[in-house]
Amino acid sequence: MNVSSASGEDHPIQQLSFVALTNDPQMFKLKLERALQHLAQSRRWIISPPVLFGSDPVGNKPPVDGDAATDDFNESNQLAGYLDLYSAIQGPPLPYELDKAQFEEVTALVHMLERFSIEHGVEIEFYLDSEIIGKIVWGLQDESLRVGLLEEWSHMLDLKK
């Protein structure tokens, strides 16, 4: 599905990124790849399913720099991925059905990563473009992710109906 702005240009895309905070990303990489593949096959995606950085054809890089991560965590050992979303901030408003579908995609990704966090004891941070918007610790969403992103988005969808 392609969204065009009033000027006929493609609608801006934002990147929802997730980073598993671990000192040994190779230990979890195959498990996370399998979980993402299972999620990808579970539904139809508006733009494309979430993927790990480095496994995408464009070669996108994670949003985390040394300032945002722990001292012993850097780009060379990140286990991170992303989901492309049509921007609800830039460009014209998204149609309700598209916005709802993207909300469902993000919710499915968050739930999958909650399970991954529990099973493997990793903390997962979420970024919208390069701004941190929340995290999951031991399978639990922090308030920023739960309320600031998901509940607020759900509320905005209710207002659009």
Image: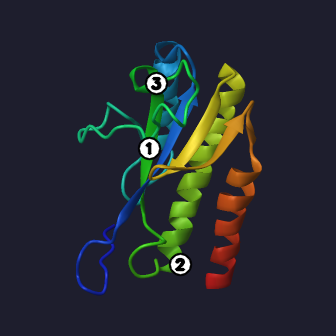
Q: Quadrant of the N terminus?
A: bottom left
At label 3, which amino acid type do we have?
Answer: Asn
Q: Residues within 10 Å of mark 3 (few under 14, many from 20)?
A: some
Distance from label 3 to label 2 (Cα)?
39 Å
Distance from label 3 to label 1 (Cα)?
17 Å
Name the residue beneath numbered marker 2.
96
- Disc 1 is placed on an element classified as strand
Q: Quadrant of the C terminus?
A: bottom right
Distance from label 1 to label 2 (Cα)?
23 Å
* Whole-percent x, y for residue 158 in the image: 69, 78
Q: Residue at x 46, y 77 (%)?
A: 94
3 or 1: tag closer to the N-terminus: 3
Visual colour scheme: rainbow
Q: Among all residues in the image, which is located at the extreme bottom? A: 6
1 or 2: tag closer to the N-terminus: 1
* Whole-percent x, y for residue 3 in the image: 33, 73
* Whole-percent x, y for residue 105 in the image: 53, 55
- Disc 3 is placed on an element classified as loop
Q: How many marks?
A: 3
Q: Residue at x 48, y 44 (%)?
A: 17
Name the residue beneath numbered marker 1.
82
The reply to whether callout 3 and callout 2 are in contact (CB within 8 Å) is no
At label 1, which amino acid type do we have?
Answer: Tyr
Which numbered disc covers residue 159? Answer: none
Q: Is residue 96 left or right of residue 84?
A: right
Who is closer to the viewer here, 35 or 9? 9
- Disc 2 is placed on an element classified as helix
At label 2, which amino acid type do we have?
Answer: Tyr
Up-down: is 47 above or below 8?
above
Name the residue beneath numbered marker 3.
74
